[in-house]
Image: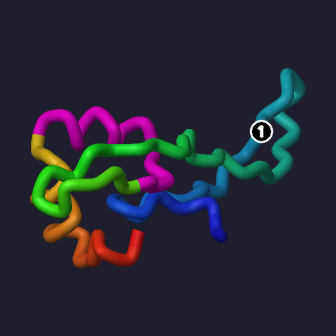
Amino acid sequence: MSRKCQLTGKKANNAYAISHSHRRTKKLQEVNLQWKRIWWSQGNRWVKLRLSTKAIKTLEKNGLQAMAKQAGIDLNQY
């Protein structure tokens, strides 16, 4: 499985690590992903998703059903 948020689609970002002498080397800024079990009330069961921490915060505000519909995923598969 790729390091990508299942609801928002966030993934790694290419960046430069800049030293004191201003020498630049490429690095990856990875997304902070967490495995999270969330209660899905419409399906009356737990759903296990790999989410970014930003998505977890947004999920508490908007709800699982609304975010899944916006992302276009079917929660019955998870």
Q: Position of residue 22 (x, y in %)?
A: 82, 33
**What is the basis of the colouring in this image?**
rainbow
Give the quarter of the image for residue 73.
Answer: bottom left
Residue in front for this viewpoint, 66 or 47:
47
Is residue 53 one of those drawn in magenta? yes
Q: Is residue 6 shown above or below 17?
A: below
Relative to 62, 9 lies left or right: right
- Mark 1 closeness class: few <14, some 14–19, many ≥20 residues within 10 Å: few
Relative to 41, 37 lies left or right: right
Residue in front for this viewpoint, 23 or 34:
34
Residue at the image position 36 percent from the left and 38 percent from the top: 54
Q: Position of residue 29 (x, y in %)?
A: 65, 46
Q: Name the amino acid type tagged 1.
A: Ala
Q: Residue furthest top?
A: 20
Which region of the structure is painted magenta? 48-61
Q: Which residue is mark 1?
A: 17
Residue at the image position 56 percent from the left and 46 percent from the top: 31
Q: Quadrant of the N terminus?
A: bottom right
Q: Quadrant of the C terminus?
A: bottom left
Residue in front for this viewpoint, 35 or 12:
35
Q: Main secondary structure of the magenta part?
A: helix
Residue at the image position 11 percent from the left and 59 percent from the top: 42
Residue at the image position 53 percent from the left and 45 percent from the top: 35
Relative to 78, 22 lies left or right: right
Secondary element type, mark 1: strand
Relative to 37, 63 lies left or right: left
Give the quarter of the image for residue 8.
Answer: bottom left
